[in-house]
Structures are given as C-alpha cells and as structure tokens.
Image: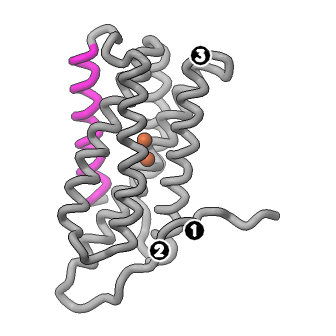
Amino acid sequence: MAEPQATAGPPLSAPAWRPGDARADADSMLRVDQAGEYGATRIYAGQLAVLGDHHPAAALVSRMAAQERRHLAHFDAMLAERGVRPTLLQPFWRVAGHTLGAATALLSPQAAMACTAAVEDEIDAHYSEQLEALGESDPPLSAAIADFQADEREHRDAAIEAGAEDSFGYPILYAAIRAGCRVAIELSKRI
Ligand SMILES: [Fe+2]
Ligand SMILES: [Fe+2]
C-alpha cells in the first residue's frame, strides 16, 4: 500500500510551547482551517455530483477539488502531529458543504462558480487575517496557509473567468454565501 502523501511540503510540528505564548490561538486557527478545507472538499464534491464528469465545467471543478484535498490532507496531518482535535461540527459541515455545492450547481454552472468566488474570497480574507495574527510565531502553519491561500486566489479567479458574475442574482448569492462562510468560520473556531 502506498504511503500517504499528506506530509509533503512544509514541516508540521508546532514550535516549542512557552507559557503565555500564542499556542492556543494557533490550535484554534488550525482547527478552523482544517474545517474550512474539509468544507471546501465537500462543496466541490457536491458540485461534481450534480455536474457529472462530462460537463464542460467539471474539469475545472475537479482540478480545484484535488487542490482542496491536498490542503485538507496537510491540515489533517498537522492536527494529528500537534494533538489538536478537529471541530465537533465536522458531520454538520459534511452535509452543509455538499448541499451548498449541489444546490448551486443545480441552479446553474454559473451559480456554482459564484459559490466558488464567494467561498474563496472569504477564505482568502480569513487566511490574510491569520497570517497577520501569526506573524513569526508559527512558521510551519504560516507556510501552509500562504501556500494554500495562493491556490484559493486562483480558484476565485478561475470562477470569475468561468462566468460567476453572470449567474442569476449574483450579488445576493455572493453576499449570502460569504455571510454563511463567516458564520461557519466563527463556529468552527469555538466548537
Ligand atoms: Fe483550500
Ligand atoms: Fe479553494
């Protein structure tokens, strides 16, 4: 059996912990990031379940889905290495992510792209906030976030290119999905 590839890339372990440092914050960041990447894999799986393999948009969505799986595998490995528990909301995100992906793909392929644009913009902003908050305190986590953030920006640009803004009711759809992502982020930090 092949060895899992999850640990490719930057190192996983946390810097040595000292009382009073920001370690607890980094644990919470890792928890919410793993939840977000998990949700992203579920959204794209939901979209692909509706679009099928032969739809013109499927190749793009499949490529983004593969990148989300890489992000998730890395954060899964970091959680395990650091002994941080995942969010208790994971079963909920499993269903919510898939439903969001499937529902937007059912509306139209452009609505599926609008979903991607909204989710990726929110994740991009979230990752920027985290990088600023982390500073130099946790280089392995910062390296992973910066690496994945570059992919998320590409996903957003690809979704716009593929017609996200042509979807029916784009401003409302976009705003609603971003607001939903913000709620998901806040819940996953805490629960
Ligand atoms: Fe991602
Ligand atoms: Fe993404």
Residue 15: within the magenta? no
User: Which residue sits at x=38%, y=48%?
Assistant: 150
Q: With 160 as the anchor, is 97 left or right in this view?
A: right
Q: With 56 as the anchor, is 53 left or right in this view?
A: right
User: Which residue sits at x=57%, y=20%?
Assistant: 50
User: How did the renderer colour the structure?
Assistant: one colour
C-alpha gap between disc 2 and disc 3 = 37 Å
Contact between labelled residues 1 and 2, with CB atoms less than 8 Å apart: yes
> Quick check: can you spot residue 33?
yes
Mark nearer the N terminus (2 vs 1): 1
Residue 70: give x, y in percent of width and height. 55, 53
Residue 172: within the magenta? yes
Residue 116: give x, y in percent of width and height. 39, 30
Q: Residues within 10 Å of mark 1 (few under 14, many from 20)?
A: some
Q: Which residue is mark 2?
A: 12
Q: Which residue is mark 3?
A: 56
Residue nearest the observer in this picture, 173 or 189: 173
User: Which residue sits at x=43%, y=22%?
Assistant: 112
Question: Could you tell me the amino acid type at mark 1?
Answer: Thr
Q: Secondary structure at mark 2?
A: loop
Magenta residues span 170-189
User: Which residue sits at x=27%, y=78%?
Assistant: 23
Mark nearer the N terminus (2 vs 3): 2
Contact between labelled residues 1 and 3, with CB atoms less than 8 Å apart: no
Question: Could you tell me the amino acid type at mark 2?
Answer: Leu
- Quarter of the image with the N terminus is bottom right
Q: Residues within 10 Å of mark 3 (few under 14, many from 20)?
A: few
Please give the label number shown on residue 71. Answer: none
Q: Which residue is mark 1?
A: 7
Question: Could you tell me the amino acid type at mark 3?
Answer: Pro
Q: With 20 as the anchor, is 46 left or right in this view?
A: right
